[in-house]
Image (spheres, rainbow, N blue to C red):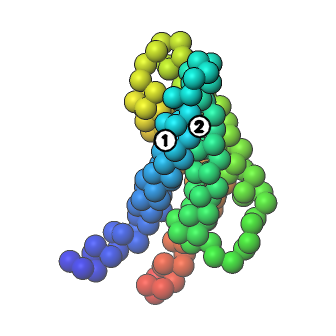
Amino acid sequence: MKNRLKHLLEKHHILITYALFGLLTVAVNYGVFWGVNAPLSRVSNRFIAEHVYLLAHVLSWIVSVLFSYYVTKRFVFRIRCDGIHLARFFSFILIRAVTELGTLLAMYLLVTVLSLNTYVMKFITDVIQVLVNYFFTKGVSFNGIDEKLKEKRNKAEGN
């Protein structure tokens, strides 16, 4: 039973660790978002108070993308010693920038235009963004890395 569980965990390592570190990235994102949005949404300037969520969203995105790149590289794909691989880093950032623009547009429409709850809409748009990011990260930024991990595992098992 223990070996079977270990085998399943290793077989699905990328998906499991991506989900785990994805949750941590969301926590970082929400922590920064809340830390910026909560105090600034109470300022007396109405324009700033009504639109600070956009600034908070962008700042939380920047911090969480940098965090996500590091943990995805180090713990999901187990890349330890290649420094910053520029092509991988920029494709990772570009993918997230494109999905972030979509998320910002959705947030603006849902919160400003439709007057829906900021935090609920952020959660919904973030879930969609995480799913899109997973498929593009695996297919573009870290393309082929999971195959190398499988090869290493097979060699270690003697296959």
Q: Tag count in the figure?
A: 2
Q: Nearer the viewer, residue 139 or 75?
A: 75
Task: Specify which label sits upstream in the sequence, 1 or 2.
Answer: 1
In the depicted structure, whether residue 50 falls above or below residue 131: above
Residue shown at the point (49%, 41%) measured from the top left: 34
List x then y, in percent, for residue 38: 49, 36
Residue tagged 1: 34
Whether residue 94 sits left or right of residue 100 in the image: it is right
List x then y, in percent, for residue 128: 48, 36
Residue type, numbered disc 1? Trp
Q: Regarding mark 2 in the picture, which secondary structure is present there?
A: helix
Q: Nearer the viewer, residue 94 or 150?
A: 94
Q: Which mark is residue 60?
A: none
Q: Residue furthest front?
A: 44
The N terminus sits in image quarter? bottom left
Q: Residue furthest top?
A: 113
Crowd around label 2: few <14 · some 14–19 · many ≥20 (10 Å): many
Whether residue 68 sits left or right of residue 27 in the image: it is right
Q: Residue furthest left?
A: 1
Residue type, numbered disc 2? Ala
List x then y, in percent, for residue 148: 59, 71
Q: Which quadrant holds residue 67?
A: bottom right
List x then y, in percent, for residue 104: 60, 29
Q: CA distance from mark 1 to mark 2?
A: 8 Å
Residue tagged 2: 56
Q: Nearer the viewer, residue 48 or 55?
A: 48
